[in-house]
Image (cartoon, rainbow, N blue to C red):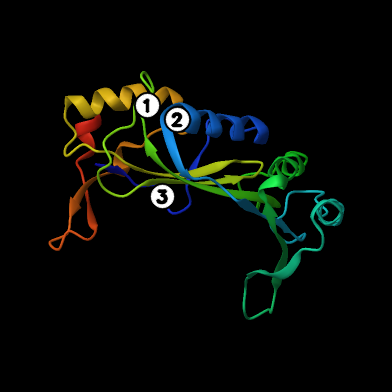
Amino acid sequence: MAYEPPDWGQPLRLKEVRQAYVAVCGFLDRCTSVSEAPKGGSLTIHERGRFSPPNYHHEPFVAAATAAFGSGDRQLGVQMFPDTGYTEYKHEWRIPSTGIERAIDLVATCPRSGPEDVPPMSFSLAWRFRLRDPRTGEALPSIGPESWLHLSLTTSPSAGFDLNFPFERPDAQFLEYLHLLRPHLPIRLAKSRFRHLTPTGDGTSYVRRKIEAGLFDGL
């Protein structure tokens, strides 16, 4: 069984940047065995554009990031309306593990963005892990590929949780485990995102197939 995230991830339950990061770390500590922790992250600051929050000015944030991490890489962020030649730019930094906390603090100072705005600043981190039983701390059987998580910290934090479970079907045992896991997850599980995880004929990889969402009505 697997849980497949949307391409754009899912909103985190907690919206404040620092609280969202702590919640993700709490889930990883309680419910997983991490095999690959972030050696660093990617910090992005967008220059002011048509879809920036009101009264947003990027220069102070670029200056603060430059003071903390050195010069960033200015590059094309998005090109819209090709007939007008309109473009927007962004600045990016590769942040080492020693700078993660400082980068999170910087993102937390960014102005709140609305639903139609492009979040002006983001910090991305990624992990790979195996799931554990949150009651006992015991690792679940190592079957299938590892799970992974991509976290995007903005003024509207989101994450892509790609979870692989060592269960063949959505039976009572699987649903019991989900009930144990759900309180610790910083996202709301979407019933439509569960998949069957089936080995390919040569046994070298897996194929995901959709499952009837009604099987998860107990969630």
Name the residue nearer the viewer: 16 or 176.
176
* Local SS, label 2: loop
Residue depicted at x 29% and y 33%:
140
Category of crowding for the residue at label 2, using alpha-carbon neighbours closer than 10 angstroms: few (below 14), some (14–19), many (at least 20): some
Distance from label 1 to label 3 (Cα)?
A: 20 Å
The tag on residue 185 is 2
* Local SS, label 1: helix
Residue depicted at x 72% and y 44%:
107
Residue depicted at x 75% and y 39%:
105
The image quadrant that residue 143 belongs to is top left
- Which residue in the rendered view is the most extreme toward the top? 135
Which comes sooner in the sequence, label 1 or label 3? 3
Residue 218: in sight, yes or no?
A: no
Tell me where residue 15 appears, x and y as whole percent: 61, 33
Give the residue type at disc 2: Leu
Q: Quadrant of the C terminus?
A: top left
Residue corresponding to mark 3: 6
Q: Quadrant of the N terminus?
A: top left
Category of crowding for the residue at label 1, using alpha-carbon neighbours closer than 10 angstroms: few (below 14), some (14–19), many (at least 20): some
Count numbered badges in the picture: 3
Q: Is residue 187 left or right of residue 204?
A: right
Q: Mark 2 against mark 3, which lies toward the viewer?
A: 2
Residue depicted at x 17% and y 54%:
199
Tell me where residue 154 appears, x and y as whole percent: 65, 44
* Local SS, label 3: loop
Q: Is residue 118 above or below residue 102?
A: below
Tell me where residue 40 appears, x and y as whole percent: 63, 51
Give the residue type at disc 3: Pro
Residue corresponding to mark 1: 181
Q: Is residue 19 above or below residue 35?
A: above
Name the residue nearer the viewer: 115 or 7.
7
